[in-house]
Amino acid sequence: MLMAMSTNPWADGAHGTHDQSALDLAALGIVAAIKKDVVAEERAAHPLPEPEPPRAPARIIALCNQKGGVGKTTTTINLGAALAEEGRRVLLVDFDPQGALSVGLGVSPYELDMTVYNLLMQRGVTVEDVRIKTNVNGLHLLPSNIDLSAAEVQLVNEVAREQTLQRVLRPVMRQYDYILIDCQPSLGLLTVNALTAAHGVIVPLECEFFSLRGLAMLIDTVEKVRDRLNPDLELDGILATMYDARTVHARQVLSRVVEAFGDKVYDTVISRTVKFPETTVAGEPITTWAPGSGGAKAYRALAREVLAK
Ligand SMILES: Nc1ncnc2c1ncn2[C@@H]1O[C@H](COP(=O)(O)OP(=O)(O)O)[C@@H](O)[C@H]1O
Ligand SMILES: [Mg+2]
């Protein structure tokens, strides 16, 4: 009886049997059904966006070599641009008071109100206050200028001085897929800050005999930072740069590097070409300035190796 009324309460009512509780129950079912319809209609009228899949925090990579002129800045710009070309959200951090990364992206470092210096040293200054959009879609820059050289000295007296960069980057970790830090040519406190913030280190290495000399000291610094400050730090890879296939010397250096570091050496090798100095003048990455060039292709290949990790 109850079952029959539930499916068709009006039919039973016509027969004169008014079981109130059964009617109520049936009505409840109808209201629920109506509500369901209304909600469905509302949903159709105001479609909710699909929830964004949660994105992993950025992988932070420090480009590091205490030797100058080995391709750190060139690699930061062009690896960053190639990752952005692949649809990744990339933040570049100019962590060298020379400001070459900023210049290489067409930013005049002396006209800036806010730089990485302010971000590190002033409470309340955020990444949002300092970052600049570059001409490459998805590629942002935290610029620097000579002010940053003062931070090296001033940070010495700070609490948790080695973790300063890590702390200021933390709030934007989910806004980016990759954060690349262009280090200055030294193993001082700024570079230790970069290594403390980083998950991985890429070492650009000029294919030239003396370039091997400083490498042991760099690896030692990476290991010390891993032991004392950042247990997750990895040596991601060694990138051979300024390779000249015509010279026996470059080939010898490359084979020695591969003997010593094996799988840690990227398959991609960056050849020496005058196109790179030209891009600095143009103030843009080689991937946009000379998209079909060998240099652009090489950095795209490196980006694929980095993505595959
Ligand atoms: N593969 C390359 N071939 C030729 N010149 C290069 C190459 N990579 C970088 N350069 C040039 O060499 C100089 C130093 O490179 P840079 O990336 O600034 O090194 P670092 O940041 O290690 O000091 C710059 O003038 C740059 O344009
Ligand atoms: Mg540099």
Image: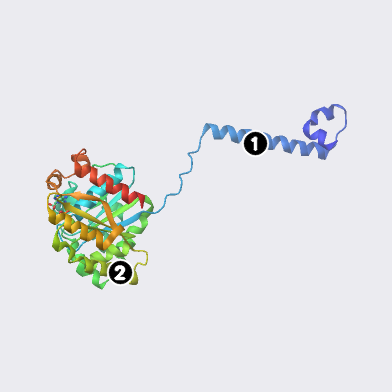
Question: Cα distance, mark 1 to mark 2?
Answer: 63 Å
Q: Considering the image in quadrants, where does the N terminus appear?
A: top right
In the rendered structure, find residue 223 and report the number of the disc placed on it.
2
**Residue in view at x 37 percent, y 64 percent:** 232
- Helix, strand or loop under label 1: helix
Say which label, 1 or 2, has the lower sequence index: 1
Q: Is mark 1 within 8 Å of ligand 2?
A: no
In the rendered structure, find residue 303 and report the number of the disc placed on it.
none
Question: Can you tell which quarter of the image residue 170 is in?
Answer: bottom left
Position of 58 with respect to 215 (left or right) is right
The amino acid type, in three-letter code, at marker 2 is Glu
Q: Position of residue 106 (x, y in %)?
A: 17, 46
* Category of crowding for the residue at label 1, using alpha-carbon neighbours closer than 10 angstroms: few (below 14), some (14–19), many (at least 20): few
| Residue projecting furthest to the right | 16
* Category of crowding for the residue at label 2, using alpha-carbon neighbours closer than 10 angstroms: few (below 14), some (14–19), many (at least 20): some
How many numbered marks appear?
2
In the rendered structure, find residue 35 and report the number of the disc placed on it.
1
The amino acid type, in three-letter code, at marker 1 is Lys
Q: Position of residue 18 (x, y in %)?
A: 86, 34
Q: Can residue 122 be spotted in the picture?
A: no
Position of 32 with respect to 103 (left or right) is right
Position of 5 with respect to 212 (left or right) is right
Q: Are marks 1 and 2 in contact (CB under 8 Å)?
A: no
Question: Can you tell which quarter of the image residue 41 is in?
Answer: top right
In this rendering, the label closer to the viewer, 1 or 2:
2
**Residue in view at x 39 percent, y 54 percent:** 57
**Residue in view at x 19 percent, y 51 percent:** 74
Placement of 191 over or under 280, stated as above or below: below
Nearer to me, 72 or 181: 72
Q: Position of residue 135 (x, y in %)?
A: 23, 42
Nearer to me, 140 or 242: 242
